[in-house]
Every structure is written in C-alpha cells, then in structure tokens.
Image: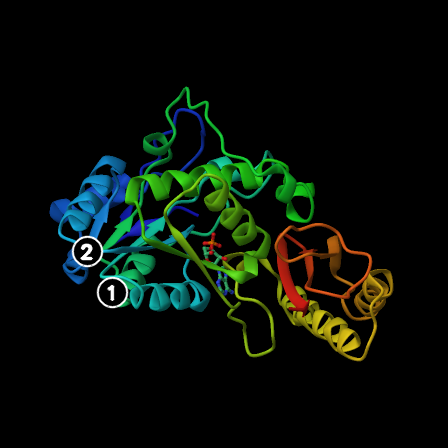
C-alpha cells in the first residue's frame, strides 16, 4: 500500500540493502516544503528522518536537563500504540515516537512490503498525544549497505515466535538498540502483546548495561477480546468473526489453572481441543507455556507461567498471550 502524507504520493527509491521499500522521507520532505497544508497540524511536533538530527535533538534536551521517553513502533496506529504514547508522555519531559517498518526483522516471504502504512494519520495521532518528535527514518539511513553488526539474545529468541521467524528478534534487538543509542532515552515503553519481544529487550538492556528503563503495558483489545494489531486488517470477515476465540481459549486455560490444573500438556490440549471446534479457519503456528522471563518451556505450572500463541488466520499471523500464574 503506497503511503501518502497530505495527499503527496510516495516515490519509491530502493534502499540499498532492502529493496522494494517505500520511502517516508520524500513524503516528509514534500510536506515540509509546503506541498501539503497538513504540516500545520504538526507545528508542535518535529518530524525527523535523519538519525543524526534525532541524536542532536536528544543531546540538546539532555544538556538542558530534560529526560526522554521513547515509544518504538512500526506505525499504522491503533489504540494499543496510543496507550503506549499516553503512558510514555507522562514518564518524561520529552517524548520521541519512532515509526520505522524495520526491514531487518522481516524474513524472506514475510509481509514487509504489504505491511499497512498511513504516515499522515500516524503523524496526527502521535502529535495529538504530545510527541515532541516523530522519527521516520528511511531504511538506507538506518542500515548502511555494508551493515554488519547484529545484536542477538538467542537463548530467549529460539522458541515461540523465534521458531517460525528465525531472524526476527535479531532485527528487533538491533534496531531497538540503535534507537536507544540515538536517543539515549531514559525510558522506553513496549506492549505486552509482544511479550517475548519485551522479555528479550529487557535481557538485552540488562546484559549490555544500557541505561534505558523498560516499561511494558498491558495488551489493548477489541470489545470481543481480540488483541489490537496492525495486521488485523489482513483478515476477511469470516476470519475476523472467529479470531476472538484465540483470547477466549487462553482465558479458559487460565481458568483451568486457577482451578488447580498444573500439567502444561493438559492445558495445551484443552486449548487445542477448543480451537479445533471453534477456530476452524485458524492454523496453529505455536502454543507454548513458558517462564515469563526466561522464556524456558515449562512442563508444570507451579510458579510464574505464560501461555503464548501464534495463529495464522488467512494472511494474518496473530499473536497473543496470557499469564497463567504471575
Ligand atoms: P508494532 O508497531 O506492532 O511494532 O508495535 C509497537 C509497539 O506497540 C510494541 O511495543 C507492541 O508491543 C505495542 N503494541 C502492539 N499492539 C498492542 C496492543 N494491542 N496493546 C498494547 N501494545 C501493543
């Protein structure tokens, strides 16, 4: 979907190492040069595309004694993203929101090019939540053609989403650390919908002594329980109608745990039986019970335990999770 900002269509230069990507920079430049009247909406918020400009702005804020909160995103905002922004706005004097569909976290055949984009709407939302900067870099400015350095937390990334998306968390860690280095953010806010992601980032930050505090926010859901996701738009009406069953079955497993069931195998079976009946359009990617911090598989639920899943509904790959015991 070509992104548009203020009615200006994106031209599509190819990034050196990640061909086929749309450029947001040209949109923003066109907007700033006055091709669009919508820029007036963003007077209180800077749109930056250059990583060095972001770093300079953040250095200037820190020099003035102002602290910085960061919300990293891939855009196409929904109420889950908005919750992170609202929360982050209250944590520091300055709020940076990044919007970057990070090619390094998409494997071959994944939805990098199809990923939904709406830069104009996203900018309006970030501005409405008091962002001081919306950082929208081009892939080529984040990854040099000979980019060769990767950050990995393999122990936590090998299971769950990492099994079917083997390079995903390497891409996430690398871009998040780059954003931390550019902003020197005092605090960064992530969503618990991507539980494994926030667990991995917490471990990366601890292991590498990154001076950014990590906060995680509960999953924001539709009224019927479906976790909000930018990818929900991929679903057909029939798939969307069944999708709330993902959450319903996880709640059922939590109830069984509260009633005394401790066998991870039996809890999994109970969920899979329900899905066989009530989620016929779903294709299971994984359903796992793990320790919420170490991501290690559990056989028994007799301490902290997270049930996490990924289910494909047509073109959408949906993830969700629930704490069986905290
Ligand atoms: P994304 O743009 O999908 O990469 O997500 C950016 C941030 O928003 C991540 O920290 C996600 O965990 C978080 N997020 C995505 N969906 C939700 C949701 N439904 N509720 C809360 N946070 C979310």
Q: Is residue 323 above or below residue 76?
A: below
The image shows residue 119 at horizontal and vertical percentages of 33, 53
- Mark 1 nearby-residue class (10 Å; few <14, some 14–19, many ≥20): some
C-beta proximity under 8 Å, tags 1 and 2: no
- The Cα–Cα distance between marks 1 and 2, rounded to whole angstroms, is 15 Å
Q: Give the labeled residue for mark 1.
A: 130
Is 125 left, or right, of 165 in this rendering? left
Q: How many marks?
A: 2
Is 138 left, or right, of 199 in this rendering? left
The secondary structure type at the circle numbered 2 is loop
Within the image, what quadrant is residue 309 found in?
bottom right
The image shows residue 215 at horizontal and vertical percentages of 44, 60
Look at 55% across and 47% down and name the residue there: 200
Look at 13% across and 44% down and name the residue there: 33
The secondary structure type at the circle numbered 1 is loop
| Mark 1 vs mark 2: in front | 2
**Residue 83 visible in the picture:** yes
In this picture the colour scheme is: rainbow
**Residue 113 visible in the picture:** no
- Label at residue 84: none
Q: Is residue 314 above or below residue 153?
A: below
The image shows residue 146 at horizontal and vertical percentages of 41, 19
- Label at residue 66: 2
Within the image, what quadrant is residue 87 found in?
bottom left
Look at 67% across and 70% down and name the residue there: 247
The image shows residue 86 at horizontal and vertical percentages of 34, 68
- Mark 2 nearby-residue class (10 Å; few <14, some 14–19, many ≥20): some
For this rendering, which residue is in front, 323 or 44?
Answer: 323
Mark 1 C-beta to ligand 1 under 8 Å: no
Look at 29% across and 45% down and name the residue there: 183
């Amino acid at each position: 979907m070509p992104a548009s900002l203020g009615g200006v269509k994106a031209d599509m230069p190819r990034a050196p190492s990640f061909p086929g990507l749309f450029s947001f920079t040209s949109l923003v430049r066109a907007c700033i040069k006055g091709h669009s009247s919508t820029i007036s909406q963003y007077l209180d918020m800077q749109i930056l595309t250059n990583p060095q400009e972001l770093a300079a702005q953040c250095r200037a804020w820190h020099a003035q004694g102002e602290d910085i909160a960061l919300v990293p995103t891939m855009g196409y905002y929904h109420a889950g993203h908005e919750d992170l922004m609202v929360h982050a706005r209250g944590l520091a004097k300055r709020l940076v929101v990044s919007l970057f569909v990070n090619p390094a976290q998409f494997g071959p055949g994944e939805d990098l090019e199809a990923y939904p984009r709406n830069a104009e709407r996203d900018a309006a939302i970030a501005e409405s939540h008091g962002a001081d900067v919306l950082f929208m870099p081009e892939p080529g400015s984040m990854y040099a053609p000979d980019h060769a350095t990767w950050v990995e937390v393999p122990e936590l990334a090998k299971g769950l989403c990492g099994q079917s998306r083997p390079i995903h968390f390497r891409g996430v860690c690398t871009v998040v650390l780059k954003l931390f280095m550019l902003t020197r953010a005092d605090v960064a806010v992530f969503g618990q919908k991507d539980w494994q992601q926030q667990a991995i980032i917490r471990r990366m930050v601890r292991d590498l002594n990154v001076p950014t505090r990590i906060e995680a926010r509960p999953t924001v859901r539709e009224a019927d329980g479906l976790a909000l996701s930018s990818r929900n738009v991929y679903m057909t009406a029939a798939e969307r109608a069944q999708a709330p069953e993902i959450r319903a079955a996880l709640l059922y497993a939590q109830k069984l745990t509260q009633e005394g069931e401790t066998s991870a195998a039996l809890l999994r079976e109970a969920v899979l039986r329900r899905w066989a009946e009530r989620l016929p359009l779903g294709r299971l990617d994984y359903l796992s019970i793990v320790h919420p911090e170490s991501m290690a598989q559990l056989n028994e639920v007799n301490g902290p335990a997270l049930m996490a899943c990924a289910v494909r509904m047509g073109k959408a790959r949906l993830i969700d999770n629930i704490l069986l015991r905290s």
